């Protein structure tokens, strides 16, 4: 992680390691010239850039056999180091890629680990909701259309018809059962009414997860746990 995230702007070369730090345009030299690096002595591998360039000391660190590949790598590194001019009065600057200031921070690193990851709708909310584990698992399946509803069983050839068992008016999908079914609508009405939460009633919504997250965004922080538990338990009971 560090090797991929830290680059060095070289000043005097007093803090930068020649082989292992990411200071050159070609990346760390131990990756740029792997065969040559394998032939460098143990002490030479830790050589600082300043000491390595002084009188071309780095060339004397090569102790392995001078095979053709080693010589090829040697010429490439030689060519690269020839053009380097150090500024002894300037400190080397280590730049952290994941923060705007270039300084290392734990939070920027933590965020970088999750760059490009996708967020599963409702995962965090469901994890925190207070309900028995089997109800949460059930609701997780519902969010991902993985409940064995009549519609799904018919689709898999396990059943001849897919009508809703509660209202017999439409195909029994997850969104029908919890959001559109007239029977479920009455259950919602009976339970949300006394809690003054009627505006949260589903009205022809299609996606359980989207509806849930949208509705809980409309209520105050203190009511969210109540609404979450209520929703999960009602869905389970339905
Ligand atoms: Zn129904």
Image (cartoon, helix red, strand yellow):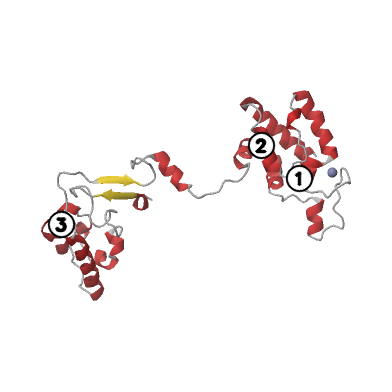
User: Which residue is label 3 attached to?
Assistant: 53
Q: Which tag is nearer the camera, tag 3 or tag 2?
A: 2
* First-in-chain label (3 vs 2): 3
10 Å neighbourhood of mark 2: few (<14), some, or many (≥20)?
few
Which quadrant of the view contains residue 108? top left
At x 20% / y 65%, what residue is drawn? 79
On the image, the x and y values in percent for residue 111 come to 45, 43
Q: Which tag is nearer the camera, tag 1 or tag 2?
A: 2
10 Å neighbourhood of mark 1: few (<14), some, or many (≥20)?
some
At x 34% / y 52%, what residue is drawn? 3
Residue 175's label in the rendered image is: 1
Mark 1 Cβ and ligand 1 under 8 Å apart: no
Instruction: Tally the marks.
Output: 3
Q: Quick one: which residue is furthest to the right in this view?
A: 168
* First-in-chain label (1 vs 3): 3
* First-in-chain label (1 vs 2): 1
On the image, the x and y values in percent for residue 73 come to 24, 68
User: Which residue is label 2 attached to?
Assistant: 214
């Amino acid at each position: 992680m560090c090797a991929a995230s830290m680059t060095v702007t070289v000043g005097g070369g007093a803090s930068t390691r020649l082989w292992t730090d990411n200071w050159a345009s070609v990346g760390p030299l131990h990756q740029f010239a792997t065969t040559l690096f394998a032939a460098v002595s143990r002490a030479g591998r830790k050589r600082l850039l300043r000491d390595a360039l002084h009188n071309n000391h780095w060339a004397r660190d090569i102790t392995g056999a001078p095979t053709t590949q080693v010589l090829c790598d040697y010429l490439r590194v030689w060519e690269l180091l020839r053009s380097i001019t150090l500024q002894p009065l300037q400190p080397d600057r280590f730049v952290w890629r994941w923060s705007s200031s270039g300084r290392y921070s734990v939070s920027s690193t933590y965020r970088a680990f999750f760059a490009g990851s996708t967020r599963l709708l409702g995962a965090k909310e469901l994890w925190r909701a207070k309900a028995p584990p089997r109800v949460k698992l059930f609701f997780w399946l519902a969010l991902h259309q993985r409940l064995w509803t009549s519609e799904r069983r018919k689709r898999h050839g396990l059943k001849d018809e897919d009508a809703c068992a509660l209202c017999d008016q439409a195909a029994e999908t997850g969104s029908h059962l919890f959001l559109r079914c007239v029977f479920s609508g009455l259950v919602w009405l009976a339970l949300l009414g006394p809690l003054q939460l009627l505006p949260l009633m589903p009205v022809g919504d299609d996606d359980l997860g989207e509806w849930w997250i949208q509705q809980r965004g409309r209520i105050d922080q203190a009511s969210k746990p109540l609404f979450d538990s209520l929703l999960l338990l009602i869905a389970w009971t339905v």
